Image (spheres, rainbow, N blue to C red):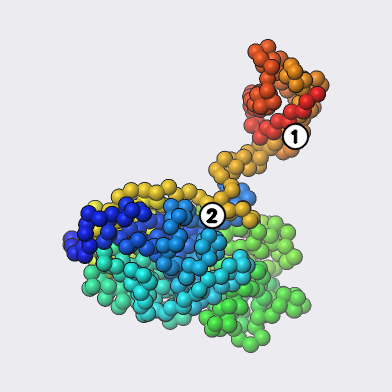
Amino acid sequence: MSRTPRARKNTTTAAKKSPASGLRSGDLRVVAAGGLGEIGRNMTVFEFDGKLLIVDCGVLFPEEHQPGVDVILPDWGFIRDRLDDVIAIVLTHGHEDHIGGVPYLLRERDDIPVIGSRLTLNFLAAKFEEFKVSTRLIEVVAGETRQEGPFGLEFLAVNHSIPDGLAIAIRTDAGLVLHTGDFKMDQFPLDGRITDLRGFARLGEEGLDLLLVDSTNAEVPGFMVSERDLVPAIEKVFRETSGRVIVSSFASHVHRIQQVLDAAHAQGRKVAFVGRSMVRNMKIATDLGYLNVPDGLVVDLPKLNRLPANKITLVCTGSQGEPLAALSRMASGEHQISVGEGDTVLLASSLIPGNENAIYRVINGLVDKGAHVVHKGNAKVHVSGHASAGELVYCYNILEPANVLPVHGESRHLRANADLAIRTGVPRDRVLIAENGSVIDLRDGVASITGRVPIELIYVDASTVGGVTEDSLAERRLLGSEGVLTVIAIVDPDTGLLVDDVDFIGRGFAHTADDFKKLGRALNGALERESDKRVASREQIETRLVHETTRWAKQNLSRQPLVVPVVVDG
């Protein structure tokens, strides 16, 4: 089977270029500001006729080698001077890796309208209160179409691990594009809302010029099992546990929490939500009718704690080992809820790549306290929300795209997805393996990588956005592994020589008093040699102190502490 790219008539003058970006008039440009080569911070910018459309704006959660970082944002620096050209932000669904960056973007332009489904916008509105931002929210439903500037938008239902997911079809004079968002093809979903394969087929018949498709499970063969297949394993946990059941899940995983509520209710248990985001999101989902909560099932934590252990269910955050989440603090003994003998902890989420060590550390901490831990590795208590290889191939055959851009995944996922597309007949040169910042232009029905814009990791540290750099993270890692050594030197400003013994303050740096005596003699000799050449400036003295201290510590103690020089005039 082979396919050829469909020729599409360019309705404008081909030689004309947009002075803002070098894009030829009549062409469509696509740039990922995040989400390629990583699981998170999904953001794609579409440009046509001088206007920009943004699909998703999420966050990436930090790994262990990024200490002190709260979240990582997409890098929209390449359009910062063109934010006035942004027509709208369109959201595919309400997970943090797709909506978490929106409030930060709105701080830079606070009137960009945001388009999304009901649950997605309500989750976002709750974040707006926290960030003290607001904008016009436009609610859409599956099957709806609307025009935003030069972009014609159509919204199609897709099934995912959160209700109200949408795929976005984008029509311009350059061609038809489909962005699947995160999706799978569960034929028996808990909410009865299946992926709109009829709509996909219709787009295929119309002639799909470019498909941006979820790659997360492209390496997983076959079809993903249904959410309903998890019910027996979850019910077993509640049926066989004589003590408390503590469930950890994403705060937005409404489907999984519905299963937990149903199992708890069947066993006569009461439920309390723990953690600000969990309490907030489940209230929103309940108020909007996405979560069915029997009367009296959910109670507040003080009331729950007065019940016997076999009547207690706690639902909290922390399934990814996040250090400040409720479950992580329970595992380390830093939470008001103590975990111990008789408790069963149910981890009802998958492992996000990069979080494995943190998750296993939490599991070990819980086991050490006497709890029984049930997780995906030892029971069928989770199923992914992303299409596996069989489902992706099925979609390729329905859609017959002329060009394919795998998105949402690490490099291995993107390449596996590309291989699937090629095997279904998409020409190899029409399947694009892109990186964050790759500039993809759709011209006359053919998509190609035409350039690159710089994309960095934008770190959020408390209220600071972008202030943390790779250099400062390297310093933090150094502090964590090697400690810090402050060198205090009183020098004669006229000669640059020491007028008193060097003083040292070590933190997290293993040493003896004798070590510092030896180091003091080495620094005194180094400053004498510097003074023989010239009268050293304060900056030169500080540089010499750092250089000699670092060299001495490495040679004599096999350590590399962060050295902080303090030079005082004597």
Residue drawn at x 40%, y 64% as measured from the top left: 53
Give the image location of residue 357, x and y in percent.
57, 52
Task: Identify whether 512 is placed above or below 391.
Answer: above
Q: Which mark is residue 9?
A: none
Residue 567 as seen in the image, left or right of residue 400: right
Work out which residue is located at the far top of the displayed protein and give it.
Answer: 532
- How many numbered marks have been drawn onto this rendered protein structure? 2
Identify residue type, mark 1: Gly
Residue 134 as seen in the image, left or right of residue 4: right
Regarding mark 1 in the picture, which secondary structure is present there? strand
Q: Callout 2: 10 Å neighbours few (<14), some, many (20+)? A: many
Q: What residue is disc 2 on?
A: 72
Answer whether residue 233 is visible to the viewer in this image: no
Q: Which mark is residue 506?
A: 1
User: In which quadrant of the rendered view does residue 72 lie?
Assistant: bottom right
Answer whether residue 210 is visible to the viewer in this image: yes
Q: Quadrant of the C terminus?
A: top right
Of residues 246 and 564, the one nearer the viewer is: 564
Residue 312 as seen in the image, left or right of residue 348: right
Regarding mark 2 in the picture, which secondary structure is present there? strand
State how far apart marks 2 and 1 are (Cα): 32 Å
User: In which quadrant of the rendered view does residue 243 lie?
Assistant: bottom right
